Image: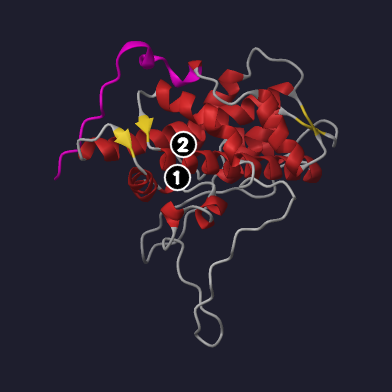
Amino acid sequence: MTAQPARPERSGPRTASVMDVSPFKPCLVKAVFRDVTPMHVSRPAAWAAASVTRTVLTEIIDGARRAAAEKARRKLIPGDLLSAIDGNVELEVGAEWYDHSPTFQGLTGVLYDAEGVIVPSRKRSRSRKPSAVVGAHRFEAGVRKLLWSQGATAVPAMVRDLDGIASVFLTDLARDAAMVVREGGVKRFGTVTQVTSGEPAPHPFLDDSLAAMSARRGDGRTIRRDDILAATTMQLFGGNLRQRALTEARAATQNTSGG
């Protein structure tokens, strides 16, 4: 059995917990939500969305740091990002960004039409309509702050990819939260279940916290914290990352008010 490489040690002020870092301001989060929905976003909801996005990016950066450490490098490069995502299915988020980044070219598969001819990859849209990809640059400061808090540095291309993934993930989170409000609760859950060949599949399982999100209370015009938590269960697979994101979002909003 191959020994797992040790995680690089952190030192100095960078030993601060992820919970102490708030790289994405509520005003920035609300700006993303305004691109998606006219619904009002409560302050606790904005904090929760920022927390979930931070948790996801922290996990990606942590995986990239381990990949870089295996090659005795301190500065993160796009190849480390690919290694992190390839090694953990839970990190496959912000997929829309993959079509726009040179880092992911050739990894999203080749498409063929009915005649067996390769379908060219879509070109970048020049539409003036706001989108997660167009607005990705606004996350750069937050990404750099998060990298610093993790004791990491990255080349510009890596920062660009983290920008894009954060923007697309948060935009998808906003869309799902708006859908939760419109539909009055969660109507679907993202779960992964391992099944052994030849054995019957187990019955679906929802723990109490997820089951409670299947219905919501409140008006149909405001996105609240619990709507963000419900959207998180739809965006992230049913693993450790999702549970940690939910836990940290609750902790980040425990002293806020307004729902």
What is the chief secondary structure element of the magenta stretch? Answer: loop
Residue situated in front as seen by the camera: 16 or 106: 106
The x, y position of residue 190, in whole percent, is 56, 49
Dot 1 amino acid type? Glu
The x, y position of residue 53, in whole percent, is 55, 33
Residue at the (25%, 27%) spot, across then down: 8
Instruction: Reply above or below: 198 against 151.
Output: below
Where disc 2 sits, the SS reads helix
Residue on which disc 2 sits: 241
| 8 drawn magenta | yes
Where disc 1 sits, the SS reads helix
Residue situated in front as seen by the camera: 224 or 22: 22
Residue at the (54%, 24%) spot, across then down: 23
Dot 2 amino acid type? Leu
Q: Dots 1 and 2: beta carbons under 8 Å?
A: yes
C-alpha distance separating marks 1 and 2:
7 Å
Mark 2 or mark 1, which is nearer the start of the sequence? 1
Q: Which residues are magenta?
A: 1-19
Residue at the (65%, 37%) spot, across then down: 230
Residue closest to the far bottom: 115
Instruction: Reply above or below: 137 against 203.
Output: above
The answer to whether residue 256 is visible is yes
Residue on which disc 1 sits: 90
Describe residue 155's horizontal placement relative to residue 248 as left or right: left
Residue situated in front as seen by the camera: 168 or 173: 168
| 203 drawn magenta | no
Quadrant the C terminus occupies: top right
Quadrant the N terminus occupies: top left
